[in-house]
Image: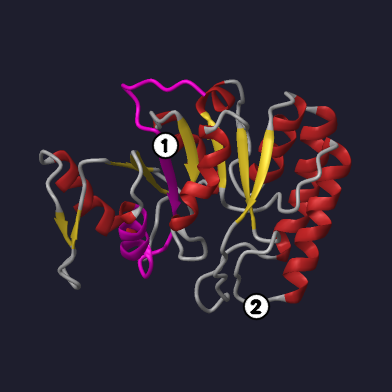
Amino acid sequence: MSFNSQRPLVSVVIPVFNERVTIEEILFRVQAVEIDKEIVIVDDASTDGTRALLEQISLAVQNNRTPFVFPESRRELRTDNLSIYFQEKNRGKGAALRRGMKEARGEAILIQDADLEYDPQDYHRLLDPITRGLADVVYGSRFLGGPHRVLYYWHSVVNRILTTFSNMLTDMNLTDVWTCYKVFRREVLEKIEIQEDRFGFEPEITAKIAREHWRVYEVPISYYGRTYAEGKKISWKDALPGLWCTVRYSLFD
């Protein structure tokens, strides 16, 4: 992979919706990763105080990118590599990612959820196949042996069914289509038009990657899942739209 010195190595795109409890910590964890990066945050019309906090951070970004001091913890957040965008109304994770990817400048684009389920210390592992010139796309799999919190059995069953169905239609052998951690060379995203606004993004992007025969790798990642009481958003109700999106983008679109 050739690199443009004018671009950061990676753009970390963070879609955010109602994550006031975790947004501070995830930003510090992402900043702590020693890698050439920019952080692109897209708030999807949060209503729990997340948006107000991000607006305060955005002022620090605009004010010569000075450090932002969180009012409660008094921790200082580096802001010179931050960009923050605001959706006017809630449109879903896919729409937020579409906006963030459009704004990203990095040689690679990495998706990071705003909760604490995924560990940014896995970035080096995720980027390794791309920086070595082996892959165009890397998926971080929760089912390849990394440490993970034990939670919902039926969630894992549905995930495997959706992944198997996707593999049957795309002729790929992924273990975790619905993982948050996906990394793309910027050339890949420049040739793909994302249409889905919500969680249908996952099967859509997978089908379009398969269609173009991009080189895909999987690596094991850590996973610290949360319960619904802790703020988990995706549910079984997203399974049927997920199946439809798999069919639509694999066979018809």
Q: Residue at x 30, y 59 (%)?
A: 28
- Say whether residue 122 is left or right of residue 147: left
Is 61 left or right of 83, judged from the image as shown? Answer: left
The mark nearer the N terminus, 1 or 2, is 1
Residue 22 locus on image (x, y percent): 38, 67
Q: Is residue 95 left or right of residue 76?
A: right
Name the amino acid type tagged 1.
Val
Give the quadrant of residue 69.
Answer: bottom left
Q: Which residue is mark 2?
A: 150
Pick the residue in front: 78 or 203: 78
Which residue is denoted by mark 1 in the rendering?
10
The quadrant where residue 12 appears: top left
User: Crowding at label 1, few (<14), some or many (≥20) Cα neighbours within 10 Å?
Assistant: many
Residue 17, picture quadrant: bottom left
Q: Are marks 1 and 2 in contact (CB under 8 Å)?
A: no
Secondary structure under tag 1 reads strand
Q: Where does the magenta region start and end?
A: 1-30
Q: CA distance from mark 1 to mark 2?
A: 31 Å
| Residue at horizontal 36 percent and vertical 54 percent from the top | 30
Q: Residues within 10 Å of mark 2 (few under 14, many from 20)?
A: few
Magenta-colored stretch includes residue 3: yes
Disc 2 is placed on an element classified as loop
Residue 101 lies, in percent from the top left, at: 47, 34
* Residue at figure coordinates x 54%, y 32% from the top left: 132
| Residue 27 among magenta residues | yes
